[in-house]
Every structure is written in C-alpha cells, then in structure tokens.
C-alpha cells in the first residue's frame, strides 16, 4: 500500500497566473503531482476542452452530482453566477495511489476543504500590486470593462483572506514563482 498522497490548494485572484503556474508544476513533478479537474456550469471558452480545464456540466447534471454527494466542495463562486466544484473522483483515487493532488479553487472552496482536510497544504498567489493585476486582466482582452471591475472587486475580497493560507507567494515573474513553489513542495516531501 503506498503512503496516501497530499492535498494542495492553490488560490489567488483571477488573472494572477494560477493556471500557468499549476501547468508548469504538474510538468515538473510529472507522475507525482496531478491537477484535479473541477466541474463547472459555465460554458467552455475558446481553446478550452472538456476534461482538460474543466468538466463542463449542465446546471441539471451538476445538481445531480451534488445530490449524489459527488463533490468534495462545490459552490456558486462569488461574482461569477456559475457553479464550480471539486469532484471526489478527481481526488480520492489519486491520493490513494500516493499522488499529490492540486486543487485550483477559490477562497470559499478552500475554507470548506480545510474543514475536511486540516493538513491540507494551502498556497495563495498574490500579484505584485493591484495595478499589475489590473494590467494582466486588461492584457487578456477577454473581459468587458464591467467584468474587469467585477473581477478586481472579487480579487480584493480574495486577497483579504490570504492570511488563512499556509504559504503566500508573490508572482512577479513566472519562472521564479514556479521555482519557489516547487522548492516548498520539495521541502514538504514531494519528490521529483
Ligand atoms: P474561471 O475564470 O475559470 O471561470 O473561474 C475560476 C474561478 O473559479 C477561480 O476563482 C477559481 O479558483 C474558481 N474555481 C475553479 N474551480 C473551482 C472549484 O472546483 N471549486 C471552487 N470553489 N472554486 C473553483
């Protein structure tokens, strides 16, 4: 029987670079670390594929999975109007195999996971400044002015909870940030 794996939460404001960071970490610790693919009721954006970024579910199917107890946590993410959730099937089998599983989830989902897994290793990614975060959101060119304002408001609310995470990392440069998180995961016992 392998030693059970470790659960990791990665949160941070929209636009801070979480997805890129997670993808690089999963590459770096190939076979040992995997991303839990969340379910969501929002539609796929151009370039997103079912089962890669998300499992895209209809609101009805999402509700059925919720009723069946299929989620570790799920919620209507603040400011989005869509449901997001961590599927138990994405987490349990990998942990049982001794893998480390990373959840890219919001601050409220993180709080729910912490209640069930007090030993969860939690990491909050901060932007170097509010101005930098706003610049990143504008550079993505995916959102209207109103959507950007809403994302910034949500970001301020999320950053106010950064202290409840075990680690906080400022993302000024992607390579440095990935290196920093890789080092802390290695210190916590994740082998390459
Ligand atoms: P997106 O831009 O992909 O539509 O929205 C991402 C937001 O939803 C981010 O704040 C992300 O952390 C959060 N999110 C993604 N998956 C989950 C999940 O499974 N559970 C929770 N609680 N939040 C999630």
Image (cartoon, rainbow, N blue to C red):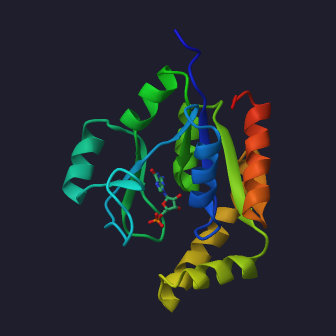
- Vertical relation: 136 (above or below) 172: below
Q: Which residue occupies the extreme top position in the image?
A: 1
Point 69% across, 30% down: residue: 190
Pick the residue in front: 86 or 101: 101
Q: Which residue occupies the extreme bottom position in the image?
A: 145
Pick the residue in front: 180 or 123: 180
- Vertical relation: 59 (above or below) 138: above
- Vertical relation: 148 (above or below) 28: below
Point 41% across, 49% down: residue: 38
Q: Is residue 94 left or right of residue 18?
A: left
Q: Residue 15 at what x, y percent from top left?
A: 60, 71
- The number of numbered discs placed on residues in the rendered structure image is 0
| Image quarter of the C terminus | top right
Quarter of the figure with residue 73: top left
Q: Is residue 63 left or right of residue 76?
A: left
Q: Residue 124 at what x, y percent from top left?
A: 69, 54
Point 32% across, 37% down: residue: 70
Point 72% across, 62% down: residue: 174
Q: Residue 29 at what x, y percent from top left?
A: 63, 38
Q: Residue 88 at what x, y percent from top left?
A: 39, 35
Q: Is residue 26 left or right of residue 126?
A: left
């Amino acid at each position: 029987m392998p030693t059970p794996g470790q659960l990791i939460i990665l949160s941070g404001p929209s636009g801070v670079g979480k997805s890129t960071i997670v993808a690089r970490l999963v590459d770096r610790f190939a076979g040992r670390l995997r991303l839990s693919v969340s379910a969501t009721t929002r539609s796929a954006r151009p370039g997103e594929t079912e089962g890669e970024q998300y499992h895209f579910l209809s609101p009805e199917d999402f509700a059925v999975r919720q009723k069946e107890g299929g989620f570790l946590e799920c919620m209507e993410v603040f400011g989005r109007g869509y449901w997001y959730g961590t599927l138990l099937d994405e987490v349990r089998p990998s942990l049982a195999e001794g893998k480390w599983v990373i959840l890219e989830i919001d601050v409220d989902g993180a709080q729910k996971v912490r209640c069930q897994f007090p030993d969860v290793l939690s990491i909050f990614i901060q932007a170097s400044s509010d101005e930098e975060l706003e610049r990143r959101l504008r550079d993505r060119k995916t959102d209207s002015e109103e959507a950007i304002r809403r994302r910034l408001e949500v970001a301020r609310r999320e950053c106010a909870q950064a202290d409840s995470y075990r680690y906080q990392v400022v993302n000024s440069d992607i390579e440095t940030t990935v290196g920093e998180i890789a080092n802390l995961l290695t210190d916590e016992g994740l082998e390459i």
